[in-house]
Image (tube, rainbow, N blue to C red):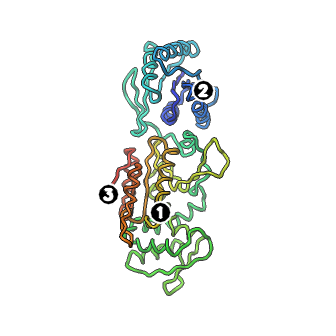
């Protein structure tokens, strides 16, 4: 028996896409109202990107969203026509999309005698629920990779730093130094501040910096940075940056690599660092966006922005990083994406002038989670909890 899926196109395409990837039906019938015809065409392109052929997709003429009598009549006629066009197929309706009125009309039009199914996709809990003919649920497979996730939201991946072999080799070479910086960020706060003050992260020119070996964690950090071929001691507390990307690493790249290493250890499905993407509708480069970490696991997304320097020194830049994470989360994350600001420095502190800086509260006001300073060492547990539950659990640093 052939499998036939019926979907109502909405602005949230992932809820329709995931069940289709899970069950891989023989044919897909798409319904939309007149105002969603452009969304339907975009969704067809996403289906093709996911491996479905154009011959498998049947876009129906727009149906009336109201009054209810017209919606129901449309659906009853459609169900009868599908029985004629696909006499040997079992119909499955994905009830995740559409309005309540649409849902009631489709529900009434389902043919119980033909054993029609109704399913619901619970992405956050990773379950595909069957509503009729028999209640039950199954676990969703891991179905989405970053390129397909972005495509479903009208975006196209340009590149990612972590795709490059050279980037991964460098990250592995200095892994011990990176983990030490992250696990002891609070104790090493002054050292990290010195990196940001003395190093220009936007140049590959030769640079030196002066660093006192203060305390055992400082000494270990500098020793590991030497072994990782980031710094070379010159004597008299002078150090030279010896690798091509060393300046960028010391001024924040280490924090991105820390996230990459932790996510790899927790066996996350997809971890992309320095991901650049644009709009499918505007394929030319120029107005692309970039996110520090784009993490996908079991069809759920975690977006992360990193900050190694102290927040509050530049109010405009502080606002920019929160606005950026909020904006990218809204446009390229979907309804279920979690957003996280990771800072090596405290997000709540006072400046030398006595002004209180509370970036944590500003982030929270836009539903952005935070992880900072001493809390960095809890990143492993936090990502593990998110991986298992689909929800970011806010923990106090």
x, y (%) of residue 217?
39, 74
Q: Give the class, few, some or many, for how many residues have Cα within 10 Å of label 3's Cα (few <14, many ≥20).
A: few
Assess whether mark 3 and mark 1 are in contact (beta carbons under 8 angstroms). Answer: no
Q: Which residue is mark 3?
A: 396
Say which residue appears at 50% left-offset and 36% top-offset: 14
Question: Gap in Å between the C-alphas at discs 3 and 2?
Answer: 49 Å
Disc number at residue 57? 2
Image quadrant assignment for residue 49? top right
- Classify mark 1: helix, strand or loop: helix
Disc number at residue 96? none
Say which residue appears at 40% left-offset and 33% top-offset: 138
Residue depth check, mark 1 versus mark 3: number of the one nearer the observer: 3
Image quadrant assignment for residue 232? bottom right
* As drawn, 386 above or below 242: above
Q: Which residue is mark 1?
A: 255
Q: Is residue 5 left or right of residue 382?
A: right
Say which residue appears at 45% left-offset and 40% top-offset: 335
Q: Is residue 384 left or right of residue 83?
A: left
Using the rendered image of the protein, determine whether residue 110 is visible from the camera's viewpoint: no
Say which residue appears at 65% left-offset and 44% top-offset: 282
Question: Gap in Å between the C-alphas at discs 2 and 1?
Answer: 44 Å
| Mark closest to the chain's N terminus, 1 or 3 | 1
């Amino acid at each position: 028996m052939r499998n036939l899926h019926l979907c109502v196109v909405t602005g949230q395409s992932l809820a329709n896409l995931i069940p289709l990837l899970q069950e891989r039906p023989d044919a897909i019938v798409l319904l939309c109202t007149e105002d969603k015809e452009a969304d339907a065409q975009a969704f067809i392109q996403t289906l093709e990107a996911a491996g479905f052929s154009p011959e498998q997709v049947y876009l129906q003429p727009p149906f009336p969203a109201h009054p209810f009598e017209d919606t129901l009549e449309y659906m009853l006629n459609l169900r009868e026509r599908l029985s004629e066009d696909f006499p040997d197929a079992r119909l499955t309706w994905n009830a995740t999309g559409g309005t309540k009125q649409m849902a009631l009309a489709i529900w009434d039009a389902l043919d119980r005698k033909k054993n029609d199914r109704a399913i619901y996709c619970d992405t956050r809990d990773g379950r595909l629920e069957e509503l009729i003919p028999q209640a039950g649920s199954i676990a969703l497979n891991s179905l989405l990779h970053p390129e397909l996730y972005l495509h479903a939201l009208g975006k196209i991946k340009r590149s990612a730093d972590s795709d490059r072999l050279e980037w991964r080799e460098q990250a592995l070479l200095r892994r011990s130094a990176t983990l030490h910086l992250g696990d002891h960020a609070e104790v090493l706060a002054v050292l990290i501040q010195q990196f940001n003050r003395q190093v220009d992260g936007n140049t590959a020119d030769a640079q030196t910096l002066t660093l006192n070996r203060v305390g055992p964690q400082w000494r270990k950090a500098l020793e590991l940075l030497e072994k990782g071929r980031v710094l070379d001691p010159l004597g008299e507390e002078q150090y030279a940056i010896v690798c091509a990307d060393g300046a960028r690493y010391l001024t924040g790249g280490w924090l991105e690599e820390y996230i990459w290493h932790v996510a790899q250890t927790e066996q996350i499905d997809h971890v992309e660092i320095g991901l650049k993407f644009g709009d499918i509708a505007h394929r030319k480069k120029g107005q692309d966006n970039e996110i520090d970490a784009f993490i996908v696991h079991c069809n759920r997304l975690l977006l992360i922005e990193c900050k190694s320097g102290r927040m509050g020194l530049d109010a405009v830049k502080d606002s920019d990083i929160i606005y950026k994470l909020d904006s990218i989360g809204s446009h390229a994350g979907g309804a279920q994406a979690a957003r996280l600001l990771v800072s090596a420095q405290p997000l709540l502190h006072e400046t030398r002038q006595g002004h209180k800086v509370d970036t944590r509260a500003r982030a929270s006001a836009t539903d952005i989670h935070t992880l900072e300073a001493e809390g960095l060492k809890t990143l492993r547990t936090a990502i593990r909890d998110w991986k298992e539950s689909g929800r970011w659990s806010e923990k106090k640093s």
